[in-house]
Amino acid sequence: MSPPLRKLCRSRNRKLLGVCAGLAEYFDIDPTLVRLLWVTGALFTGLFPALLLYFIFALVMPEAEDP
């Protein structure tokens, strides 16, 4: 039997737009870890590229469906 198909979508467990929590749910890791990695990456690359990428993800990723 194959594992259930996972879909990358924004999470309802959100702090801002649900992008980091959606990525965490997809990869089955802690959302706080994804958020910390995102902020760390933003600080090391400059804020603009990370913010731009975040908002592009927010536009492209669909909203999570209700279970």
Image (cartoon, rainbow, N blue to C red):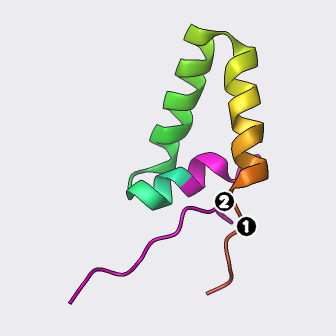
Q: In the image, is residue 27 above or below residue 41? A: below
Image position, residue 41 (x, y; %): 54, 20
- What's the residue at 59%, 25% (across, down)? 39
Q: Distance between the residues labelled 2 and 1?
A: 5 Å
- What's the residue at 52%, 31% (across, down)? 36
Residue 11 falls in which quadrant of the image?
A: bottom right
Of residues 25 and 32, the one nearer the viewer is 25
Q: Is mark 1 on a helix, strand or loop?
A: loop
Does any portion of residue 28 appear in the rendered image? yes
- In magenta, the rendered stretch is 1-22
Query: Tag 1: residue type?
Result: Glu
- What's the residue at 66%, 59% (across, down)? 10
Quarter of the image for the N terminus: give it.
bottom left
Image position, residue 6 (x, y; %): 45, 71
Q: In the image, is residue 6 above or below residue 27? A: below
Residue highlighted by disc 2: 10
Asked whether residue 2 is drawn in magenta, I would say yes
Q: Is mark 2 on a helix, strand or loop?
A: loop
Q: How crowded is mark 2: few (under 14 residues within 10 Å), some or many (20 or more)?
A: many
Quarter of the image for the C terminus: give it.
bottom right
Does any portion of residue 17 appear in the rendered image? no
- Pointers 2 and 1 in contact (C-beta within 8 Å): yes
Q: In the image, is residue 8 above or below residue 46? A: below
Query: Tag 2: residue type?
Result: Arg
Q: Is residue 32 left or right of residue 47?
A: left
- What's the residue at 62%, 19% (across, down)? 42
Residue highlighted by disc 1: 63
